Structure formats: C-alpha cells, structure tokens
Amino acid sequence: MTAGDEIRGTAHGTAPVPLSVLDLVTVGAGRTASDALRTSVELAKLTEARGYHRYWVAEHHSMPGVASSSPAVILAHLAAYTGRIRLGSGGVMLPNHAPLVIAEQFGTLEAMAPGRIDLGLGRAPGTDGATAAALRRTDRLNEGADDFPQQLAELTRFLDDDFPDGHPYRRIHAVPGPVQASSPGGVQSPHRPPVWLLGSSGFSARLAGMLGLPFAFAHHFSAQNTVPALDLYRESFRPSEVLDAPYALIGVAALAADDEKEARRQVLAAALNMVRLRTGRPGLVPTPEEAEAYDFSPMEREFVESWNANVVHGTADEVRAGLDDLQKRTGADELMLTANAHGGDVRVRSYELIADAYGLPTPA
C-alpha cells in the first residue's frame, strides 16, 4: 500500500471527483434523536450501496437539532451496518478532549472496522463558549485553540506509539494500538486511522500543508474562504509519509428534490434553523410549513438569502450542475455533501437523486 491509498477515493459514474457524506444527525421538530439516528443508519447503508466514498459525522454540542455530540459512538453503530464505506469524524474537536482518549476511541473503531476509519480533527469547540468551558473544565478557550499543534503532535504520537525515550508518556500506550504488536505473541492490524485536518480559515490549511496531511474545508459555512484556504494549503504542502501530493475535500451543503419548489421549501426550513442558531435560539429543525409561515425580519431575510446562495439545491440535474461548477472553481479532490432538512426521508432521497444524476452504481 502506497502513501495516500487510504485517503484518495475513486470517482464513480460521471462524477468529477469522489462523492462523500457529512452527517450532522439533524433532528426535526416532532422527531426524536432515535429517529435521526435511524436515518443515519439508512443513509449510511444507501450511500455505501451507491458508491459514495466516505461517511463522516460531525461533533456538535448543546444544539437540540443536532444529535451528533459523540461521533465515536455513532461511528461504532454505523460500522455494524456497513462493510465498505469509510467512516470518520468530520470532525472531532480536539481541544475538547484529551489526545489519549481520542487515540483509544479511534483505535477501538479501527479494530471494529479495519482499514475504514478516518480521524478528522478540528480546533473549534463545535458549540458556544459556555458549553466549551463545561466540556474542557476551563474558560481559557483561546489557549486550547492555540495549543492545537501540540495536541495534534501528542495524539499522533499516541496513534503511532512512538514517544521518544525520556518522554513522560513513553510508557503510556493507546490500546487498541501498535503496542499490541510488540507484546509477546502480539499481532496488530497494519492500518492506522489517517489523520485529516479540518478548517474554515487559513490556520489549519497551512498546518495541514506543512505536515503533508489531507485537508477538509468547511465550504458549507465559510464559502468566502474556500479558494484562499485551498490555495494556501497547496502552496504550503510538503510531501510526507502520508501523502506525496495535496489532497483536499470540501464540505458542501447540497439538497436535491423531485422538483425545484420542494427543494426551496426544504432549504428555507434549514435556513430558519440557522437564523435561530446564530441569534442564540438553537432548536429542532423546523418544518417547511413553519418556515413558510415565519415572519422574517429584513435582517433575517438577508441572512437567509446569503446562506442559501451557498446551498446547492434544486432538481437532481440542477444540483449536479452546481456541484460540477463548484468543483471546477475550487479544484477540490473530493466533494463531501451535507443535506440538512427537517425530515430524514428528504435527506435520504436527496442522496439517492444525486447518485442517479451522476450514474453512480446501483445495488445488486
């Protein structure tokens, strides 16, 4: 296996690059977290059958409409229902956690699904400041972000079990992990979860390039920074044992429906959810009917129009054209699609329609 084999995907059908999935495990009004997680299982099985390359789960906290506070737990659940698609975090917010804990969690996932686990890492809290302080047991949040390179280095040492002699952690081992191969009679999997850096600005782009790691950019909520960040990543890139050339995916908000009007209704509901989140009123994803009846203020209406301008939505053919154009403009090596909507059936249908539009494989 050469460097990058566990990172680079294969495009299927007429897709310009590999297509993947970002799941926020959204919970709609009138639905439960159990309903959302059942949708995640259905969606993982469908996208695996249709040739999507990877399936990532985001880490968010204290948001009623997002049930993905524990990515490792959800990924373990999805591993039991899938057999090929890569599973990963999009991402684990590393300053919220001790590096050893993450090495143990993802070593366990690797043991459950050998050769299929990705470890995407971010440095944002994935929540508001008060919740981040509760997670980290400190209110010095900037310090956590500033320490990200050191935390990343420590996590990588735990994953590789290669702290140098004299280091205080030299005799501490992440298990499951490489130490098992060096134990008497030990045999260890040859796979180690590839580390990805996630970002919405230039910091992680530059760091990923300098370290020769794959990079995932959050285009879905920071579209104005996408091209500059990808340019910075490519300019900063140094070949490593992981990659001999840059590899970047972008997260894209995309929703396809059977007709254009229905797609507009669905993305309006998701946009209302974002309005409430951004104004300190997080809640469940509203229904399209509630969004249509909502009296948006001029400022809220401006936000919705700006937000939805970066959501690729419409019929399957319209979404395909929008994704093709976005890939050409950014040069992204992979498109990771996130479909936020009130109903799980709407989300599943969107990925199915996009697969059909690109002629992705159909289940046997």
Image (cartoon, helix red, strand yellow):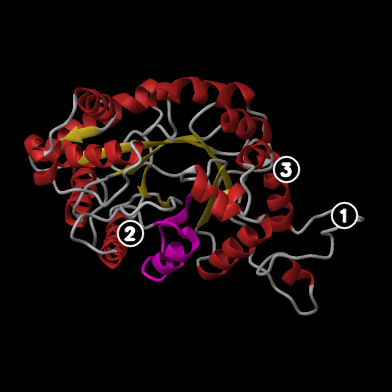
The secondary element bearing badge 1 is classed as loop
The secondary element bearing badge 2 is classed as helix
Question: Which x, y percent locates residue 74?
Answer: 42, 63
Q: Residue at x 27, y 45 (%)?
A: 339
Measure the C-alpha gap from mark 2 to mark 3: 34 Å
Q: Residue at x 52, y 70 (%)?
A: 112
Bounds of the magenta span? 68-91
Residue placed most toward the observer, 115 or 197: 197
10 Å neighbourhood of mark 1: few (<14), some, or many (≥20)? few
Q: Nearer the viewer, mark 2 or mark 3?
A: 3
Q: Amino acid at mark 1?
A: His
Question: Which x, y percent locates residue 353?
Answer: 18, 46
Question: Which x, y percent locates residue 204?
Answer: 58, 33
Residue that carries the numbered disc 1 in the rendered image = 167
The secondary element bearing badge 3 is classed as helix
10 Å neighbourhood of mark 3: few (<14), some, or many (≥20)? few
- In the displayed orientation, state which residue is furthest to the bottom: 185
Q: Which mark is residue 217?
A: none
Whether 86 is among the magenta residues is: yes
Measure the C-alpha gap from mark 2 to mark 1: 41 Å
